[in-house]
Amino acid sequence: MAEEHNKLLVDLEVRIKQVLFLCDSLKEENARLKTEIKSGRIHLDETAKELEQLKAKYDSLKIARTITAASVDVDSAKEKLSKLVREVDKCINLLK
């Protein structure tokens, strides 16, 4: 009977050690995954900023091209510039 209890205690100790080892492994994996998520978020933020910069450059190029094209197609250029001026006026009115 005592031998059976000792065997059960040893088995319990082994299982507890296995659970503790598994717990430590999961904690390490959790920390690694948190680091990966943080790194991914930083990369995502940088990419979003780069995208915004590229959009601003693209808009500037479109405006420059409109002005350049003005010599070729004056009416179209005037229309586009008028549209841009109206948009700016709307934004100014909204800010007031």
Image (cartoon, rainbow, N blue to C red):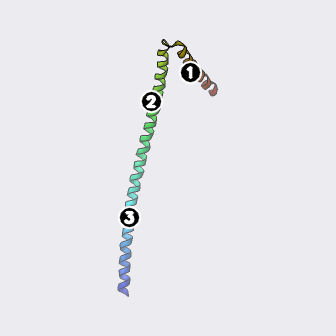
Please give the name of the residue rendered at 55% of the width and 18% of the height, measured from the top-left corner: 81
Q: Circle 2: is it few (<14), some (14-19), or many (20+) Cα within 10 Å?
A: few
Q: What element carries label 1?
A: helix
Q: Residue 60 placed where, x, y %? A: 47, 23
Please give the name of the residue rendered at 35% of the width and 85% of the height, measured from the top-left corner: 3
- Please name the residue that numbered disc 2 is placed on: 54
Q: What element carries label 3?
A: helix
Closer-to-camera residue (73/6):
73
> Which part of the image, by quadrant, shows the N terminus?
bottom left
- Spatial CA distance of label 3 from label 2 is 47 Å
| 3 vs 2, front mark | 2
- Spatial CA distance of label 1 from label 2 is 19 Å
The answer to whether 11 is drawn above or below residue 49 in the figure is below
> Which part of the image, by quadrant, shows the C terminus?
top right
Which quadrant would residue 95 be assigned to in this image? top right
Q: Residue 52 placed where, x, y %? A: 47, 32
Q: Tell me the kind of residue under disc 1.
A: Leu
Q: Residue 43 placed where, x, y %? A: 41, 41
- Please name the residue that numbered disc 1 is placed on: 84
